[in-house]
Amino acid sequence: MSPVAPSKRELPVVALILVVIAVAARARTFGNPVIGFDEQFYLLVGDRMWHGMLPFVDIFDRKPIGLFLIYALAAGSGSKAILACKLLALASVLATALLIFGLARRANGPVGALAGAALYILWLDFMEGEGVQAPVFDNLAMVAAAAMVLVGIALQIKYSVLVEGIYLGCLLIVLTWQAGIRGARLAGYVMTWIGGALLPTALAFGLYTANAHAGDFVIANFLSVLGQERAGGAAEGTAVIASILAPLFVLLLKHKTWVRGGNLLHGRRGGTGERIAADRTRRWRSRRSVRHGAGAAIPCSRCGRSGQRNHRFSGGSVVTGTNSRHCRRAGYQRHGRSFRASFRLIYRAAAARVSMAA
């Protein structure tokens, strides 16, 4: 069975569940104006922009201009600016969670995809993301990065997403290479992706240059960032992040026990008991066929194709279905991937950060 996109019937239910989870996890911060000193300063900069002050010139900080534009949008609401910031962050978190669900759902069951989306919302609170920190917004752009220009937008919210952008760029290069594109054509694609990622920063620099403030932009965005000293070491930050993510690793280790006997979350044909029985019967027949020399007639459990040369043998038994070469080319996933594939979306984002509050 091929990967399945979220259905129209699933999305409203999933959206409602995620809204409830997000509001419950973040509502206590809605009326808190001092949850983080960074947020207070960002909101101050956004408010001063309405009075004609220019970031990096009239008021200094190392964050990109895109972050201050978001806070300026909230500051435009006047006396409700603090609440407006919280609601913008809530909307961004919900949109990111829905995108995570959509990405995971295309290769996994609805429960695993929903688990990944819900854990993203909940674990933000442990990573100092319960307020209006910059990653709450740049995560949305990174998850939605169907084009490298969205990586560039995320860069103009916080430069720490550079690591994730490089990862996505390398992934695009590998996938394009595997598709058979080589030489000058591949080089052209790479240059286009790099240009798209740098475009928002180039536009911001161009605007400052046009107003004779190129030096202020370079100092605030690049020289001061490279010259700052951290109070804590990289080892300490890594240890903190590892301790926060440790419960998720426990879930990964327990996952094999939960789905033993078949993938209970992958597929629509038959009930849970039927899928377990069918999977066990298929494995028994595969082992019996190998013992009697009938490996060439073993059908693939996913697509129905036969052929001993298309299946991997291990310990006298045939691992059918998702380990077949033709199934891998068709985009099928291994059994037991529903939770793990969803969690990896979280790990890749967390591993790219030394600290969300940096």
Image (cartoon, helix red, strand yellow):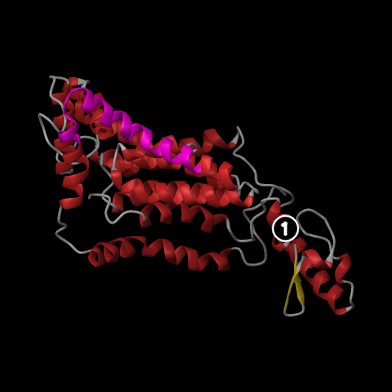
Mark 1 lies on a secondary structure that is helix
Q: Position of residue 38 (x, y in %)?
A: 17, 42
Q: Is residue 287 left or right of residue 37?
A: right
Q: How many marks?
A: 1
Name the residue tied to disc 1: 275
> Which residue of the protein is positioned furthest toward the front in this rendering?
184
* Residue 329 visible at all: yes
Name the residue at 70% across, 60% down: 322
Name the residue at 26% across, 39% down: 132
| Magenta-colored stretch includes residue 213 | yes
In this picture, which residue range is highlighted in magenta? 190-217
Q: Position of residue 170 (x, y in %)?
A: 48, 51
Q: Is residue 175 left or right of residue 33?
A: right
Q: Is residue 262 left or right of residue 27?
A: right
As displayed, is residue 188 above or below residue 324? above
Q: Position of residue 93 (x, y in %)?
A: 37, 39
Q: Nearer the viewer, residue 355 or 224?
A: 224
Dot 1 surroundings within 10 Å: few (below 14), some, or many (20 or more)? some
Q: Name which residue type carries label 1.
A: Arg
Name the residue at 16% across, 29% down: 213
Q: Position of residue 29 (x, y in %)?
A: 24, 40
Q: Nearer the viewer, residue 104 or 195?
A: 195
* Residue 20 visible at all: no
| Magenta-colored stretch includes residue 331 | no
> Which residue of the protein is positioned furthest toward the left in this rendering?
58
Dominant SS type (magenta): helix
As displayed, is residue 90 above or below residue 181? above
As displayed, is residue 297 above or below residue 331? below
Q: Is residue 12 left or right of residue 137?
A: right
Q: Quadrant of residue 276?
A: bottom right
